[in-house]
Amino acid sequence: MSDVEAFIMAPDQSLLSRIRGEYREMPGLRLTFTQACRLWQLDGPTCHRVLDKLLGERFLQCTADGSYTVFSFPSPTPAKSSLRSSDRPHVSHRRHRA
């Protein structure tokens, strides 16, 4: 592939910026490939290149159902604690007379 062909095939930076901005402005945005093509008014090959670029940057991730969402690291499992009355140390609240 020549440099000119690579340039023509590369997604436009303004398009990538616009798509990143839309994902940032709409937390939880999930789009299928077809929805992405329609929303951004892109033909199939261009949309594939854009999504592949954003996947490669780890800006987007493709979920098991084929939706494109903002990449997120798995959240750590929160520590669980419960203090049942039997687990708490006994503290006497009575005043002792001296």
Image (cartoon, rainbow, N blue to C red):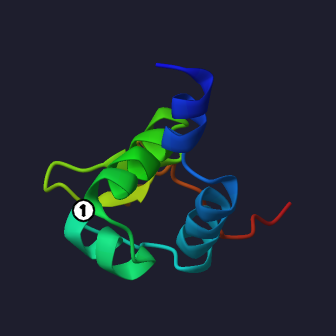
Percent coordinates x, y for residue 11 in the rendering: 54, 48
Residue 72 in view in this figure: no
Q: Give the camera-side residue of 17 and 23.
A: 17
Residue 60 in view in this figure: yes
Q: Total of numbered circles in the picture?
A: 1
Q: Give the camera-side residue of 68 and 7.
A: 7
Percent coordinates x, y for residue 61 in the rendering: 38, 46
Residue 52 left/right relative to 3:
left
Q: Is residue 57 above or below residue 72?
A: above
Q: Is residue 46 above or below residue 43?
A: above
Could you say which quadrant of the image residue 15 lies in?
bottom right
Q: Secondary structure at mark 1?
A: helix
The residue at the point 39 percent across, 59 percent down is: 69
Crowd class of label 1 (few under 14; some 14 to 19; many from 20; radius 10 Å): some
The residue at the point 30 percent across, 51 percent down is: 45
Farthest left residue? 65
Farthest right residue? 98
Given the image, on which type of amino acid does mark 1 rest? Phe
Residue 68 left/right relative to 54:
left
Q: Which residue is disc 1 drawn over?
A: 33
Q: Give the camera-side residue of 45 and 94.
A: 45
Percent coordinates x, y for residue 33 in the rendering: 24, 62
Q: Is residue 26 above or below residue 14?
A: below
The residue at the point 38 percent across, 69 percent down is: 42
Percent coordinates x, y for residue 31 in the rendering: 30, 69
Residue 5 left/right relative to 13:
left
Which quadrant holds the C terminus? bottom right
Q: Is residue 11 above or below residue 29?
A: above
